Image (tube, rainbow, N blue to C red):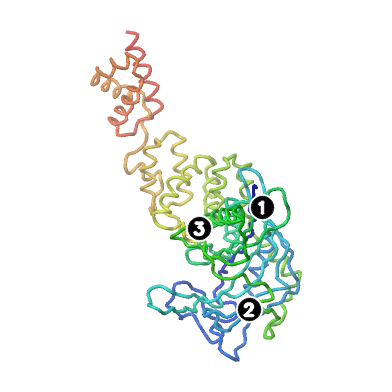
């Protein structure tokens, strides 16, 4: 029997607020353990939470960007469970009245659009972090993360394979980053995912037994875990076994899932409205103001880059994957409108520098190693035949952290391209005189010698000769030589 997988994802996105969701503690990552804590987020008896308005605003931004219905009056609830990283014994979340519902995210599958529906987006507080390694038989708990605001974004089971799940997650993360509400850093846990997967015979509609996979902290891990779990469930059913609803952990080292606990249902958490918090009532004017402030989102921007700049899909996808990169590209193209050439330089040399300096890990790059206007000027110099592509790479390296323009660097270093025919002919004549054997080989039909001779001419002119003119003049002279 042939099976298909049915996948739904629950994403937890930490929000980029200055303070936690119900208290004034900082959300800064990397502080000493239990430094960003107070009586509220530690869960002392008698304290009262106060909802951070910025969290509500960010939730509305996410909902509008993903085509959700915004609930005008939503409610915060207590979700009861007892883990050492949850000091109150309950988590403040949302249940029957989430702030956003019934949205969708469109993903691109090799040029074909697929819609992944969203069941809900709701606000909640994060739990602390258990630290199990390196302390003998003991585990430690760091409560810095407790109370950090989260959005839980729950999809419908609309994905049919691990690749689709990976594309959906990358698309969703890009949307949140464009909105400036989540940095999307999976290593630090600010963008996390639990995956729900079941399998069913192809051609049927009934859902199979659902398994939840936790401990997924990278796109690669998510895709591998889903691949493993799909195979495990298929093997179990093919051998006559029975699947049970459970939660499993992904073991990164062994690259396999393992049982963690039987899966809880909603009634196990005993949800009820939090008596310390009023309903969240949102007026139309605020929603309209937030809607007006939304940026152009990655999918819309990608489509515009394809039509306005005639870029290939690959270029458009890379350039719009981050808002800051797309902004940089458009700044450069506005100054000098050779979109494809500027795109090539960004995806090649600029990306190299960003990776080397780990600037690509920042949410939004404000200070670029090479100014957008300087990159535009560099491309213009190439198009004007003032410098060659090889020289341009030297100029680019000199532009990194420089306060001088490409034109200034070219003049200071004497790098301007030589297009004077007489000078190029003189150099070519010298090379032809120096390599009679190679010319004889070329006469004998070894066309690869031509590239060698071009290289020697460029070397003799310190890479400054116009390559096109070198090729034209050298071909003409060799033709004369052969004819003679």
- Percent across and percent down for residue 432 are 27, 19
Instruction: Mark 2 or mark 3: name the one nearer the start of the chain.
Output: 2
Question: Foreground residue, 183 or 346?
Answer: 183
Residue 474: % across, % down = 35, 20
Q: Is residue 59 above or below residue 423?
A: below
The image shows residue 343, relative to residue 297, as above or below, that is above
Residue identified by numbered label 1: 106
Query: Upstream in the sequence, badge 2 or badge 1?
Result: 2
Residues tagged 2 and 3 counted as in contact (Cβ below 8 A) = no
Q: Secondary structure at mark 1?
A: strand
**Nearest to viewer (mark 2 / mark 3):** 3
- Report if the CB atoms under discs 3 and 1 are less than 8 Å apart: no
Q: Secondary structure at mark 3?
A: helix
Task: Write down the residue under mark 3.
Answer: 221
Q: Position of residue 166 (x, y in %)?
A: 57, 54
Residue of label 2: 92
Outermost residue toward the front in this view? 240
**In-image side of 292 versus 445 (left or right):** right
C-alpha span from label 3 to label 1: 23 Å
Taking the image as shown, residue 208 lies to the left or right of residue 229, namely right
In space, the residues marked 2 and 1 are separated at their CA atoms by 30 Å
């Amino acid at each position: 029997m042939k099976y298909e997988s049915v996948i739904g994802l629950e994403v937890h996105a930490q929000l980029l607020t200055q303070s936690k969701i119900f208290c004034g503690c900082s959300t800064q990552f990397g502080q000493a353990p239990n430094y960003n804590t107070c009586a509220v987020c530690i869960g002392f008896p008698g304290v009262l939470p106060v909802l951070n308005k910025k969290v509500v605003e960010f939730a509305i931004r996410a909902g509008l960007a993903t085509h959700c219905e915004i609930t005008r009056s939503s409610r915060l609830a207590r979700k009861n469970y007892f883990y050492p990283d949850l000091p109150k014994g309950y988590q403040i979340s949302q249940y029957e009245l989430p702030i956003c519902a019934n949205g969708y995210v469109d993903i691109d599958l090799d040029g074909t659009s697929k819609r992944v529906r969203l069941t809900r987006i709701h606000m909640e507080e994060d739990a602390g972090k258990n630290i199990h390694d390196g302390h003998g038989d003991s585990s430690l708990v760091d409560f810095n993360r407790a109370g950090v605001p989260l959005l839980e974004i729950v999809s419908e089971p609309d994905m049919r394979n691990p690749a689709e799940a990976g594309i959906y997650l990358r698309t969703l993360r890009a949307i949140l980053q464009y909105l400036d509400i989540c940095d999307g850093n999976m290593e630090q846990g600010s963008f996390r995912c639990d995956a729900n997967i079941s399998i069913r015979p192809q051609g049927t509609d009934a859902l199979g037994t659902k398994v939840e996979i936790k401990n997924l902290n990278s796109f690669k891990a998510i895709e591998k875990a889903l691949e493993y779990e799909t195979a495990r469930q298929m093997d179990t059913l093919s051998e006559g076994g029975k699947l049970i609803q459970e939660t499993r952990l992904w073991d990164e080292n062994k690259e396999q899932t393992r049982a963690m606990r039987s899966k809880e249902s909603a009634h196990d958490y005993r949800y009820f409205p939090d008596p310390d918090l009023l309903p969240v009532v949102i007026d139309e004017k605020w929603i309209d103001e937030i809607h007006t402030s939304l940026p152009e989102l990655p999918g819309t921007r990608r489509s515009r880059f394809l039509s306005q700049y005639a870029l290939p899909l690959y270029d458009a996808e890379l350039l719009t994957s981050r808002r800051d990169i797309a902004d940089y590209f458009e700044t450069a193209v506005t100054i000098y409108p050779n979109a494809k050439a500027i795109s090539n330089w960004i995806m090649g040399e600029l990306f190299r520098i960003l990776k080397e300096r780990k600037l690509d890990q920042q949410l939004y790059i404000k200070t670029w190693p090479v100014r957008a206007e300087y990159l535009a000027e560099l491309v213009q110099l190439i198009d004007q035949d003032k410098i060659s592509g090889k020289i341009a790479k030297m100029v680019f390296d000199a532009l990194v952290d420089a306060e001088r323009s490409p034109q200034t660097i070219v003049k200071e270093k004497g790098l301007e391209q030589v297009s004077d025919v007489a000078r190029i002919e003189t150099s070519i004549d010298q090379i032809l005189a120096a390599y009679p054997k190679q010319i004889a080989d070329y006469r004998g039909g070894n066309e690869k010698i031509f590239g060698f001779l071009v290289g020697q001419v460029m070397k003799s002119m310190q890479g400054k000769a116009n390559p096109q003119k070198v090729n034209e003049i050298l071909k003409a002279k060799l033709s004369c030589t052969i004819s003679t």
